[in-house]
Image (spheres, helix red, strand yellow):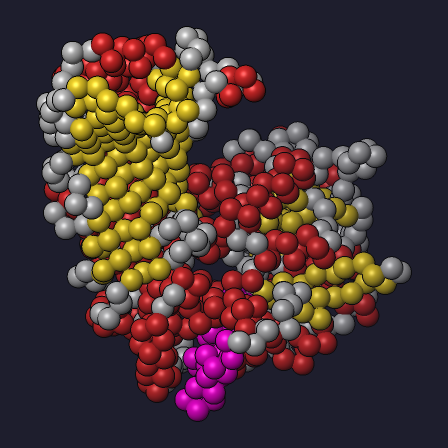
Amino acid sequence: MCAATTSVILKYQKQICSEYQCVTEYNSRSGEQVLLSERYTQPLILQRHRGQKEREEEIRSSGESFQQVLSARSSDDSVHLNSLFDPDGHGIRPSAVILQGNSGNGKSFTVQKIMMDWASGDLYKEQFDVVFHLKCKEINRIHGIKCFAEILSCSCSLTSDEISQVLQHSPEKMLFIIDGFDELRLTQDINDMSPHTDLLQKAPAEVILCDLLRGRILPESFLLVTSRSTATDTLSKLLKGPQRFSEIMGFSEKGVEEYFQKFFKNKKLFRKAYTLVKTNETLITACSIPVVCWIICTAIKERLKNTADVTSGLETTTSIYVDFVCTLLKHHCQGLSQSIPTLLRSLGQLAERGMLEQQVLLDEKSVYETVSDPAGNPFLCKFLFKRRIDQETMFSFMHLSFQEFFTALYYVLLDEEESQRKFTQLFSIDEKSRDYYSRRSRFSAVVQFAFGLLNKDVRRTLEKHGLVVQSKTQTHLKKWILKMGQNTYSDKVRFYLHCLYELHEEDFVKKAMKTWKIIDAYNAVISRTDVWVLLYCSQCCQCIEELDLTGCRLSSENFRMILPVYHKFKKVNKLNVLVSSDSDLELINALTSEQILRSQCIDVVFTFEDCYLELTIHEEISIWISSPSLESLTLTFQCREPINIEWAKLIQIIHQADSDALKSVLDSFSELKKMEIELDCLSKMWTHWILQIIQNCSSLTELKVYADFLLEKGIQILQSSDTRPACSVTFHGSICNYQSQKRIRNEDFHLSCNQEVKIHLSSSGFSMETL
C-alpha cells in the first residue's frame, strides 16, 4: 500500500476514534454523551442455529433456570468479536458474517465497539487494513443515483476521492459492516435488478448496497451484516458466500453483573443495585436484553437523586416493561405504517392466542392473520426450523414474559365492556374444574401485569402514546382484588401480594390488606421476588396478626431482606433459614432486639451443614441446638431481654463436643431459666459437667437430661454427689451395666440396657423411679 493511501487510512482511523469513543444514549440531551468503554459489555454470541426445543427452553425459562440455560450455551458455543472471521474446523474462512439479534440486544452497539477497536489497533489489525460502517437507516435517506465511493462518503468523514483511492488497494483486506439490514428499504425487486460491478457506475443507494452484498462489487472484500431475525432469511439468500451465521443472545448473568459495575462505578452502589435486581426473577431475566439493563440502571440512578437509599424500592416489573416497549416504539418503529394503538392491539391478540393455546412458538399463518407486518415488527422474533426436507417459519415474542405483558396490555386497552368480559372470564374459572390450576398459573402473570398497568405513573407513560386505560377497567380490577383478598390461603396469597406490588399504590395496598389477619404461605417455595413483594406490602401495613411460613425455606440473604418489617407481625410461625456462613448466625441477635421482643411470637429454625438452631420466642425465649456430637441442647431464658451471644462460636463448641468451653458459655447466662440436654449416653464426663452447671447457674429452675443410656458409673457419681440443687433436675434413660463410655450397638448391649428409669436430684437428695 502506497504512503498516500496509508496516510488517508490513518486519518480515517483517527476520525473514527474521535467519533466512536462516546455513546449517545436514548435519554441524552444535547451535548450529553458517555464513553463507550463505560457502557460496552461483551454480549453472548453463538455461531450456530438452535433447534425448536432449545428456543422454547430459552423463551419459557426465567430467573436462575434462565441463567443456567445461558450458561450452558455460553460454555459450549460462545465466541468473541476477534474470532468472527476465523477459519472453521475445515479451514474455511467466511467472506460474509451475519450477526443476528433481537431489538435492543446490542447489534449497533457491538458494531460501534468493532469500529472503535479496529481504529485503535486492538481488533483485526492483521486481517483488515480498512473497515467501513454503513448504516441502513442512513442509506434510506440517500436520494438520487450515486457511485459506491459517494455512498461511502455519506457514511464517513472521507471524501469520495479519498475513498476511491483506498478502494484501489487490497480489497481482500477490507471489511464492510452493514448495520441494520432489516431497516433497509428495498424499493425494487431485488432479483430483477441488473448487476452493477463497476465502482464508478451510479445507481440508487440500495441497489449499489445489494450488489456489494452479492459480491458483484469488490468480491474479495469481507462483509459483516447485522439484522433482526425477521429479515435474515432474505439476507442469507442475497448474501455472497461462504457465509457464517452468528447470533447475539444478549447478556449472560456475568455480563449483566459487569454492565452494572460499569454503569455505577461506585462499588457500594453497584452491589446494592445489582442485588436489588437479582431479587426479581422476571427483571433479572429481562436484563439479558442490554436495552432493558440500561433502562433498569437508569431508573435506579434516577431514584438515587431523590433518596440516598437505593433499596427503598425499585420500579415495578410492569413499569420496566412499559419503558422498554416505549423505547422500541420511539426508536425502532418509524417505518411502520400502523398507528401505535393498532400495532399494540394486534400484538396483544397474537399474545393472547399463544397464551390460550400454551404456545410460545407461533406458526407463520397465525402471525400474518393477526399482525400486518411481522417482518418489520421489533417485538417479534422469526425462526426457521428444519422439517425433514423442508423448512418451517415460526415467530415468537422475545420471551414468554413479553407475551404475558402484551396479553395484559391488550386486555386493559380494550373498551370497558370487552375488557371486563375478558377479566371476568379469567376470574370466574370454576376452582373445582380440572383445568383451573393449570390455566390460573398460565394467566397469573397476565393478571399481575394488568395491575401494574393500572399504576398512575405507568398510565401517564402510556397516555403519551395515545394509550388509555379506562376508569371502569381500573375499578373492576380493584374491586375484584378487594373482594378476593379477604379469603387468602397459601396457594393464592402470594399471587394477591404480587398484584398489589405491581399496582404500587400505597393507600390502596393499605386498604386491601386492612382486614388481613394472616399471610399464609405454608409449605410454599419462596423465591427472591416473593420476599421482595412481601417486604413492600408489609411496609404498607401497620400490623398483621400472623405470618405463616411453616415448611418454607429461605436463604440467609432473603431472610435479611424481610428483617426490616419483621416487627410488623405479631406471630411468625416456623421458618427455616438456610445459613451459608458463620456471620449469618448473627441474624439471631437481630431477632432478639427490643422492638421484636416487646410484642412478638417467633419460631425460626437456622439450618447449616449438619447442625440446627431453633429460636422460639413466646412467653420466654427458647433456643434449641442440635448437632451430631450433642443430640440437642435447649436453653430457656426467663425474661424477654436481648441476648448477645457469639452464635458461630457456640455452634463450633457444640460441634466439637468441647464440654469445658460449653460450660463456660452457659455459666455466663445470668438469666438462664431452663435447660434440656439430649445425649447418646450419660457418661462420667457428662455427669461431672452437669453437676458443675447446677452449681454455677444460680438462675436455673429446671434442668432435664435425656440419654439413651445411663451408664452405671454416671449413676454412681450422682448417688455419691453432695450436690443439693434448689432447682428441679431429672435424668431420663435406660440403665446400662457396661462401664464403657462408648456406645456399643449389638444385641447383648441392648438386652442389658432395657430398664428405663427416671432419676431425680433435688434439695432432698438422690432418688430413682422405674418406668
Q: Which residue lies at the image location 30% right of the left edge and 33% below the top edge? A: 624
* Image x and y of residue 273, in percent: 34, 45
Q: Residue at x 57, y 36 (%)?
A: 118
Q: Is residue 273 above or below residue 56?
A: above
Residue 587 part of the magenta segment = no
Residue 235 visible, this orientation: no
Residue 507 in the figure: left or right of residue 248: left
Q: Which residues are magenta?
A: 402-431
- Closer to us: 474 or 348: 474
Drawn side of residue 639 relative to residue 142, left or right: left
304 on left or right of 594:
right
Query: Residue at point 44% right, 91% down?
Result: 417
Residue 326: percent from left, percent from top = 43, 67
In the depicted structure, whether residue 231 falls above or below residue 439 = above
Q: Which quarter of the figure is the N terminus placed in?
A: top right
- The one nearer the camera, 743 or 40, is 743
Question: With 201 as the anchor, is 510 left or right in this view?
Answer: left
Task: Choose top left, top right, bottom left or bottom right for residue 461.
Answer: bottom left
Q: Quadrant of the C terminus?
A: top left
Q: Main secondary structure of the magenta part?
A: helix
